[in-house]
Amino acid sequence: MNETERKQGEWEPKIIAFLCNWCSYAGADLAGVSRYQYPPSLRIVRVPCSGRVSANMILDALRSGADGVLVSGCHPGDCHYISGNYYARRRFAILKRFLEFVGIESDRVNFSWISASEGEQFAQVATEVTERVKRLGPARHLVKEF
Amino acid sequence: MTTPRGSVLVVGGGIAGVQAALDLADSGFYVHLVERSSAIGGSMSQLDKTFPTNDCSACILSPKLVECGRHLNINLLTLSEILSLSGEPGSFKVKIRQNPRYVDVEKCIACGSCAEKCPKKVPDEFDLGLDTRKAIYLRYPQAVPLKYAIDPEHCIYLKKPGRCGFCEKVCPAGAINFKDTPKEYELEVGSVILALGFRPYSPESLDFTGYKRLKNVVTSMEFERVLSPSGPCMGHMERPSDHQEPKRIAWLQCIGSRDINRACHGYCSSICCMQAIKQAVISREHSASGDVDATIFYMDMRTYGKGFEAYYERAKAEGIRFKRARVHTVCPATGDNLRVRYADEEGKIREDEFDLVVLSVGLETDPQVMRLLHDMGIEVDADSFAETTCFRPVETSKKGIYVCGALAEPKDIPQSVVEASAAALEAERLLHVSRWTETKKKEFPPERDVHAEPPRIGVFVCSCGINIASVVDVQAVTDYAWTLPGVVFAQNNLFTCSQDTINQMAETIKKERLNRVVVASCTPRTHEALFQETLREAGINKYLFEMANIRDQDSWVHQHDPEAATQKAKDLVRMAVAKVRGDEPLPYNSVPVTKSALVIGAGIAGMTAALSLADQGFPVTLIERKDRLGGHGRKFFRTWQGQQVQPYLDELVQMVEANDKINVRVKTTIEEVSGSVGQFKTKLSDGTELEHGVAIVAVGAESYKPREGKWNYLYGKNPNVHTLLELDQRFIEDDQGLSGLNQAVFIHCVGSRVPERPYCSRVCCTHAIDQALHLKDLNPDMDIFMIYRDIRTYGKREHLYQKARAKGIIFIRYDLENLPRVSEDSGGLKLEVRDPIVGADITLHPDLLVLASAVRPRDDVGELSKLFKCAMTSEGFLLEAHMKLRPVDFATDGVYLAGLCHYPKPVEETISQAKAAASRAGLVLSRDAVPAESITAQVNLQKCTGCSVCTQVCAYHAVNMDPNTGKAVVDTGLCKGCGACVAGCRSDAITLKNIGNEQLMAAVEAAMEDF
Amino acid sequence: MSTMNEKITEELRQKARQLLESGRVAAFLGYASGSVPMVMRPFVARTPEDADRLEWNSFCVLNLANYLPALLKSFEPPRRPNEPPPQGPLPKVGVVATGCWSRNMVVQIQENQVERERLVIIGISSRGMVDRKKVQALIAHRDVTAVKEGDNTLVVAGPGFEEEINRWDVVRDNCKSCVHPDPVIFDDMIGELKGERDLPDRFSQVEEIEALSAQERWKWFTSEIQSCIRCYACRNACPLCYCPTCFVDDSRPQWVGKSIDSVDTAIFHILRAYHCAGRCTDCGSCESACPMGIRMRILTKKLQKDVLQLYGIEAGMSVQEPLPLTTYKKDDPQDFILTESLKGEKK
């Protein structure tokens, strides 16, 4: 949690986080406003809704070299677009199991529900996902070697 | 009244004045906003953070100020004062004097060279004298207008022409004008809104506090400046004597408030408890080691607002100490430390040592403001606040002149904002026939067609004072931005959102022929709109813009890792540049407005909102689930000011029923809602389909009835146990039996502030005490006991509490560990409770036991909130768009809320909120069309297979199959731009404009690029 | 005594002939023998005489649904993109369908690729089709010149040999694990409906892989697809793949590299399979079509298993039931959501 303890030169994973504009992105903002600290591993991509995130986007992140992916949306029932997160939930459930099936480690691809008022939870999730990905080490399966 | 003027005078440029001005200017009225100082922003701009969200005060305020400063229909008159006012509602004549600034606002670029060279240092009033400024100064870094001013009291040149004059020599813009003179204006306006705010109580005369004698005793407002990153300590928490970080801090509550013995103020200042808790929480965050020992000395902890009690509980859990004690002296101790002597609850004298003492000073009306009110003929109450009544909460004694904010009573920011909108509503109601008669129309320059141009990207990297720059190496980020493909301009700014930077950005866009812009600063959620408008003003489409969030999601969350934060900032800028490269100009869509409103719930809130709109000529459908109008208000006896509620309610019902613009439907609920702002379609339970442009949700709440469980206290079992409302019913019916009672006991917080309902119900303390006083009136010999946890008679309601004590009503405190025990004893009631002052149990035998039970949200609010896509709090109340600055808006455009469904509140606040909701709704209804989503889905017919996945996942029925082509087609009026269809499409045949797959992939890929 | 398949063939020809003669259909889609043993080719009978060339045996492995949209379209008058569709009924097409093919037709109907009213479906309950590669493996990949099919046996002959093998031993994996042999929609049946098969271990192939570690699964996956030459025969044989521009051919955006680099190939297979999620009926065409013997069906079978387990849906069982990824339930399982599982841990 405390990155002052992060040793010089220690590997810091890069994690692509697709956050919905209305809940999770606002939650991430609130984490900042409340000064909850978390590791500097996330690269946040703002999307209108978790329902905007397709399997292709997640694969693209892994293909581009992300060590992990986090997709976060509004809690079920809170979707600003009524039902985007419900469709996303099905899509992600299937995709996550499928990627695990072909050998992508379970902790690489993560999903969460974080509301606009959950700054602390956002920091927790960011920390948790980073720790999980750190334990796995760099992701290489879907990255081309040149 | 002849045709009234279509313009309004707003006096006072604090948050209330600014909100009132914006509401009016956005709904068709021209506004003159008069501010005494050199910049708007008021007290809110001096605060560090705001409770209970810990939002940075300046950050949330700044966009509103800038909007106000740039608004075409707001004439900002700073350094100005009212000389006289005459006339009548609809046509007032106002004389205004604008004092000289000695700096030409057209020329000043706010570079600061003048202040740098100015040799004259004077105490900085913005920092409450904790620091100095120069005789030529900027009120504060984000000041609007962002223009320097010369203080004639201190300027050497103005005192003795011929001497000094350095500023004139160094000003690169030639903006100094020593010959500037006062200007007088005579304005004609239809209405006046007074938003003159408060000044903090000065505790100099309170000797026991040691204020001014002891260096390390500061007021709460001074401490705000100490904490503020733009304050005298640059956000490093220091105590005045030795600039060391204090480790032990005490807050002394009620300094100048709730104090009738020391000739201070009798009222409660309403905000200080929360402010102290906030400061305690924030001081720990500011502390380098994080181990500040924070102690708050208080009488009653008044955390009665939405989210307050949870904030209080969190503070307790984090180790902030709360001592229920009144301090009697602060004396010097070793070094510059302070010894605080106080009597604890048992009456024992104790002493604790602190490094710093913060006096939570109250709010009072400025004597200068008092004179102005007097000159205008506005009546003030005994506490020197503008006189209002519960049923007319924003109306002054003079017709056509309205009041909002702390001028009428101490209050927090959201309540001030609510009243500002409510005051605007009253002006709108008065002047509605002259809407749009005096306003100007915003014309943007034609947009340059950038389609054929290669990307020319400009990157503006914000320091946000020190918010970003203290962690992120902004210069390195700026230098890095220059190296990115397509970037032809990059610059670091101190405050990118300040008006001069924004103006300069527009110039840069033109000069450098930029066709894409990236701002790396705070969050697009607050600042995107502001920067986008700058693009428009500079003649390019506003969608050619991206933000990199290097503050909220970078510098603030990696405070101890500057290197990684800088690296991340570079990555975020690279991602934004990659994304903006693919951005295309988009059309500005709009939706025609159905100029009618649906109001749900015909209680006081709903009826007030309905009348407020109908009186402006907008048709309203008012639906009520029960068979008669009145709602929860039917159960109330009187307001805390003593006005009877039932006659008022009857009159309200009569007015609603007589108003031909209001269509009342009782026993009606909502079945289905479709459409969006401007064009809602709602199906009612009676089968009718309604088209309306806006909706106001005012469905109320319920009184908790403790029939079972821990808070039962024999309710429903013994006939002499009532809730507050049941006693009110007996008052309404003028029950003669009450005067014969010998003893009445009230138990407070029944079902509130308990684990299953952790919030404070706000109204019950005042309600219970008022009832006790009424019982005393009925039978002066009656013994009355209040079994309470904290008495929360905030604001002027405190006088009731004082009166109750004076009348011999006895207050006994309990806590959750020592609940009162109620049993039946030979037919009568027996109540035992531990008296913490006596330190022993006492036994009472009331013949009336009144339970001040919670106000709880209605169970069906959840369903309704889903229909309108509104959010709810974990407690089940409806959640506004922003706790501080958008208190009556939902995040869903065109839907507003008022009354108890938002949070427990007394009648006067319900009325204000209903009027505020009507004012906000008026922003939509006063227009023929409202802007619609530009970022909409788009079908690529070459790729579309017509499989209809998109039509099935679209929640708005915005994607349909074209029967001719067999392919998908998007209705851009309905499309909300969520992108569910895009993610659902296997064929990549449907995309979201500017949030296409290619663009998101470009951003993702950019994030991973090594460099 | 003729075999079951001979009887079916006879009945099929007769029904097809009647349909063509009566003009009820403009064409009839079935199978005819090709020049190579054990390979049946899809055949469109356009005249009553053509009907006699139709045949039914255990080698009818290519999913006929795949050809329906184009065949139907060929009977529509040509029109410009924005021209309204022609008034009045369009010519119909007859087609033979087993369980999985009929379910693919249901999906096609749901996805607007074919219209039910333009189909005349002759249903046949499937006994399972034979995997040519399994036969070849059994006879050590010698050349085969002729195969004679009995009800439960295959007599495989080639230069200098003739071997009888048990038909069920060489039935395709997908057919062996199939629980829905009966067509779900049809206008006429040949033979009886057999009813659902009870197969508790229908997903055993998938479960074996699931039991491995992540590392072992990655190893399995990459070795399985290692020989892929990106010929897209699997895609072309699939009735679910009908996008005008397939993602593999797209360059803006480029979802997947076009090389046979192992990463590109992996992404291709992941995406191809994922596109079939909730839609695949496990007809096995992809695997049957693959020249390299890649068992990519296990990927779609995994998806099928999860969709069934999580949402209780199997693709194409009913036109009324929406496809699983175009619908949701509020209480869909979400234990994979981190914030939910963390909540669970705390409790």
Image: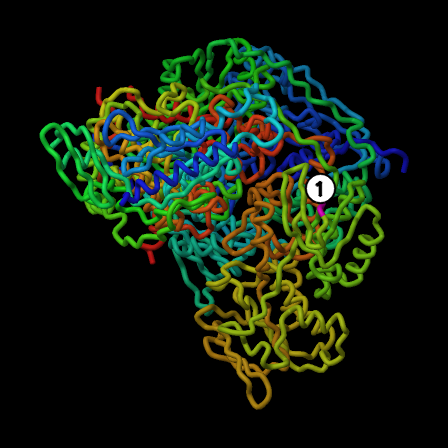
Q: Where is residue B57 in the image (x, y as percent from the top left)?
A: 52, 38
Residue C121 lies in the magenta stretch:
no
Rendering quarter of residue C40: top left
Identify the residue at the far bottom of this view.
B826
Q: Which quadrant is the C terminus of chain A positioned in?
A: top left
Residue B389 relative to residue C198: left or right:
right
Identify the residue at the far front of this view.
C1
Residue B693 lies in the magenta stretch:
yes
Residue, disc 1: B692
Q: Position of residue A136 (x, y in %)?
A: 22, 38
Q: Which quadrant is the N terminus of chain A positioned in?
A: top left
Chain on which label 1 sits:
B
**Residue at image point 53% right, 12% down:** B451
On screen, C179 above or below B121? below
Q: Is residue B460 visible?
A: yes
**Residue at image point 27% right, 43% down:** C3
Residue B224 relative to residue B645: left or right:
left
In this rendered view, identify the residue nearer to me: B201 or B629. Answer: B629
Q: Position of residue B66 (x, y in %)?
A: 59, 28
Rendering quarter of residue A72: top left
Instruction: Give the mark count.
Output: 1
Q: Position of residue B341 (x, y in %)?
A: 44, 59
In this rendered view, identify the residue nearer to me: B486 or B268. Answer: B486
Residue A48 relative to residue A124: left or right:
right
On screen, B331 above or below B515? below
Tell me the crowding category of disc 1: few under 14, some 14 to 19, or many 20 or more residues within 10 angstroms, Cα based.
many
Q: What residue type is labelled 1?
A: His
The secondary structure that most of the magenta stretch takes on is strand
> Magenta region: which residues?
B689-694
